[in-house]
Amino acid sequence: MTRPQPPGSHRRGADRPAPPRPPVPALVPVPGTPRRTGTHRAPEGRPDAATRTASRPRRPSPPPGTAPGRTVVVPAPRTAGPPPAPSVPARTLRTASAPPDTTETTTVLPATTRATPAPDPAPPAAPEPAPPRERASRLLGVDATRGVALLGIIAVHALVEATDDGTPTASYLVFGGRSAALFAVLAGVSFAFMTGRARVRTGPDLRATAAMLATRAGVLMVLALALSWTDPSIAALILPYYAIAFLLAIPLVPLPTRVLAPLAVLLCLGVPVLSHLVRPFLPVPDLGNPSVLDLVTDPGALLSELTLTGAYPAVVWLAYMAVGILVGRLRLSDRRTAAALLAGGVVAATAATGLSMWLLGPGGGYAAIAAVSPPGILDSAPTIADAVTGYPDGVTPTSTWWWLATVAPHSGTPLDVVQTTGSALAVLGAVLLLASVTARGAGPLLGHLLRPLAAAGSMTLTLYVGSILFMNSPLDDLGPWEGYLWQVTVAVGIGLAWRRAVGRGPLETAVSAPAHAVRDRLRGRARDRVA
């Protein structure tokens, strides 16, 4: 009788001779079982014993003396260590027709031995990575779109929002609300990229991802508190609101797409309505940049402002991140996907704008708002339409439900969220289409246009903070348009130079390095526990 060998021991090395092969494999019968003679060949039209036992479940062996036993052939498991010792003697067989370096061992066990359980099903594979050229096109398009959002938000801060009589300016109507919404959608796209463009499975992966996003939120909040001395009338900091929104977005990453898609629609349409119901019972926000003193003296009021009543309420802006996660799971390097984003975004933005105009005009919305508004709102602009457009600062008054029909910048209404989401998707789709043309070498002029935008978009956090510091310094003694063009030129120039010389922006590294370190440490602990 031959001692069972561990898997892989049949391979012959340079100093190990090949073991002798038996001419014909034999089976070890169970005592008391009728002996079979002849070669191991199944009758014509019937599978052999090994095939039958591998394709159907085992029957329990009968008590001794009631029925003859049965011999079962079970493939030996391929494991790193030696196989478990059988309860009765077994014999290792080799396939006679296989070459020495590819033979597979088979262990013959009596019928009283249980069959080897099937291995656990493997988890679904991650999305297939895009080819290098398509991946470069996707990254160029996403970074360039971030650059567009950065230039838009600088325009909102640097340019004039309204004329002397209170009429909103054209620049504010174009960039107001839309640029910040584009930032939020792209933040959701980044979440999808960080999680492999797929849902995160519950368990160690989800804990590591949650810790990474929470660490990013913490670093952003620390940075926001360090900038609390800046003037909110120049620029209301979006960073503390983003930090809260990052925390709220953690439960979204493990959701499958079929669940996340209707949830994103519900967030866009339902959360502003719930906010309209709740805000009358919450403290009035001061709309200042939060400080450490606010965090210590009145944390409840600060949390209320950051989540529901402030300039960028995190609960409302969570809808943008949900949409961004959905978009990030798409194949953005596909031109059809980019075209669908462009067309769908234009349709959504146009439909929301048209519905708002009909509700407020022929529907009687402007008249209803004027009837319940205090004189301060009515006197802020020459017409009620201009007053409704320029008054909201993150949220609308709760004096009448008709306020929810506006699409005014930073109003946070259902139609405003749909319109700004559609605008963000349209801009992203258009830039992705341009990037796909550039990636195929057919548009050198487009490449010269997109690459500077992508360079600035790759370090938006650094350039955003630099813009805030500049506008709150004595250096900003320029006119609105002169100061804006100067900031754009410097931002693009710094982005190109830094990306070519260093790569990732300094504040981007300060945020991502600790987040990735926490994620990798948790993953390492999980692997150690498994090992």
Image (spheres, rainbow, N blue to C red):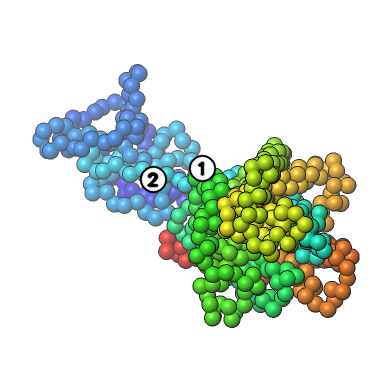
Residue 325 visible somewhere in the drawing: no
Q: CA distance from mark 1 to mark 2?
A: 29 Å
Q: From the viewer's perspective, is 519 left or right of 333?
A: left
Q: Which sits in the foreground, 53 or 337?
A: 337
Above or below, 87 relative to 65: below
- Front residue of 476/124: it is 476
Q: Would residue 1 be found to the left or right of residue 420 on screen?
A: left
**Residue placed at 10% from the left, 35% from the top?**
65
The residue singled out by tag 1 in the image is 258
Quarter of the rendering containing residue 231 = bottom right
Percent position (x, y) of residue 430?
75, 44
Q: Which mark is residue 346?
A: none
> The residue tagged with tag 1: helix, strand or loop?
helix
| Mark closest to the chain's N terminus, 1 or 2 | 2
**Residue at the spot 78% in from the left edge and 61% down from the top edge:** 166
Residue beneath disc 2: 119
Taking the spot 46% from the left edge, 59% from the top edge, the residue there is 204
Q: Position of residue 96 (x, y in %)?
A: 41, 34
- x then y, percent, for residue 351: 67, 40
Looking at the image, residue 203 sits to the left or right of residue 137; the answer is left
Q: Residue 252: x, y in percent?
A: 52, 54
Between tags 1 and 2, which lies in front?
Answer: 1
SS class of the residue under badge 2? loop
Quarter assignment of residue 184: bottom right
Assign the N terminus to one quadrant of the image: top left
**For the residue marked with disc 2, what is the amino acid?**
Pro
Foreground of the two, 255 or 515: 255
Say what amino acid the circle numbered 1 marks: Arg
Residue lying furthest top: 44
Image position of 391 with respect to 221: above or below: above
